[in-house]
Amino acid sequence: MKFIDEALIEVRAGDGGNGCVSFRREKYIAMGGPDGGDGGDGGSVFLEADSSINTLVDFRHTRKFVAPRGRAGMGRNKTGQSGEDLIVKVPVGTVVHEDETDELLGDLVRDGQRMLVARGGFHGLGNARFKSSTNRAPRQSKPGTPGEKRRLRLELKLLADVGLLGKPNAGKSTLISKVSSARPKVADYPFTTLHPNLGVVAANGHRSFVMADVPGLIEGAAEGAGLGIQFLKHLSRTRLLLHLVDMGPLGDSPEDVATIVAELRAFSDELASRERWLVLNKMDLVPPEERAARRAAIINKLDWQGPVFEISALAGEGTDALVQAVMQHVEKTRAADADGDDSVPEPPA
């Protein structure tokens, strides 16, 4: 199934039913009086987060959603039937914007969370509502109000605890395939990842976290080059970024690593300031006598002060230690969020 993370849709709530003008007409009852009933309310349109949906692909074919209108009132004080509300299912993690004004309407981050996006019209009033001591036979009624109509922009941001960042062919897909059950495409050429992948990483027992792999970044990504920039928004919800560096003979130079940091900052200052760890991958391809010098060159170029891990995703070397360290960090941030504490936990030494 193709991964779709943006969609434009139109939603329209149902109009309210019109009020009725009617008079009671029965044998032996003279001047029965007004008995026109009210109309029904129009149906509203809601968006509901559903964990069983992974993409917005369904909205490529169905883009208009219209709720039923309320029925008109009838004689004998019969109220018209209200229109049923329309529930539109979207993936968990969907952000909703008003397309014309770019106003943020809401963010659906929990399964079953529901948001009203178009309110149904109010019912009209029948002539029975207008009778009084001075107006015994009113012939006026009130029509129902129209339902709201909106053009919405849906944007999916994946919910993941940890995001993988790096150049194409840095080994992000290999790492997520080794530590989780995700099976992204893995090959010995760049740009094998064309859409984000999610994987659940089990640390031990019932402890786990979600890892996201997005297409790699290249220089000029902030101006639209490559694929990764359009998917970086999926990393905005993560608690931690793992910056993978290709340490192979034809891999990343210290300048390449600095380029990724610059592109990240050009995309979003908030994302650039997110907690980030350096993961030196493919260390099995580096001769032991050169490892210290290669590591020092990258750290000095970035003036790096944070945690650094040396791994080989393909061989599985160092991945267990990385997973355990990430699990501890994620658990601390989850506890801080639960307590309402905005402080960031200390990274491992």
Image (cartoon, rainbow, N blue to C red):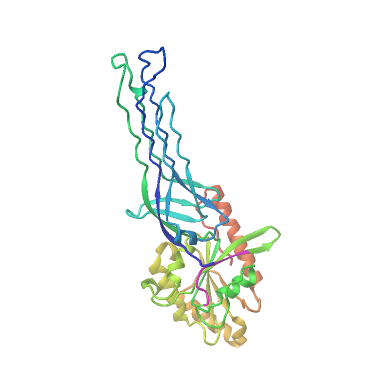
Q: Residue 114: percent from the left, percent from the top?
A: 50, 46
Viewport quadrant of the C terminus: bottom right
Q: Is residue 79 on the magenta stretch?
A: no
Specify whether 306 is left or right of 121.
Answer: right
Q: Residue 165: percent from the left, percent from the top?
A: 50, 71
- Between 198 and 281, the one lying in front of the other is 198
Specify whether 94 is left or right of 348.
Answer: left
For this orientation, the residue located farthest to the left is 134
Let me know if residue 46 appears in the view: yes
Q: Residue at x 44, y 27 (%)?
A: 78
Q: Point out the stretch of residues depicted in magenta.
A: 192-200
Q: Residue 145: percent from the left, percent from the top?
A: 34, 37
Query: How many dots with numbers?
Result: 0
Q: Residue 30 sits in which quadrant?
A: top left
Let me know if residue 273 appears in the view: no
For this orientation, the residue located farthest to the front is 27
Compared with residue 14, is residue 216 higher up or lower down, i.e. above or below? below
Compared with residue 208, is residue 31 higher up or lower down, i.e. above or below? above
Compared with residue 51, is residue 229 higher up or lower down, i.e. above or below? below
Q: Residue at x 50, y 56 (%)?
A: 93
Q: Residue at x 35, y 14 (%)?
A: 31
Q: Residue 76: percent from the left, percent from the top?
A: 43, 23
Q: Residue at x 34, y 26 (%)?
A: 21
Viewport quadrant of the N terminus: bottom right
- Between 346 and 166, the one lying in front of the other is 166
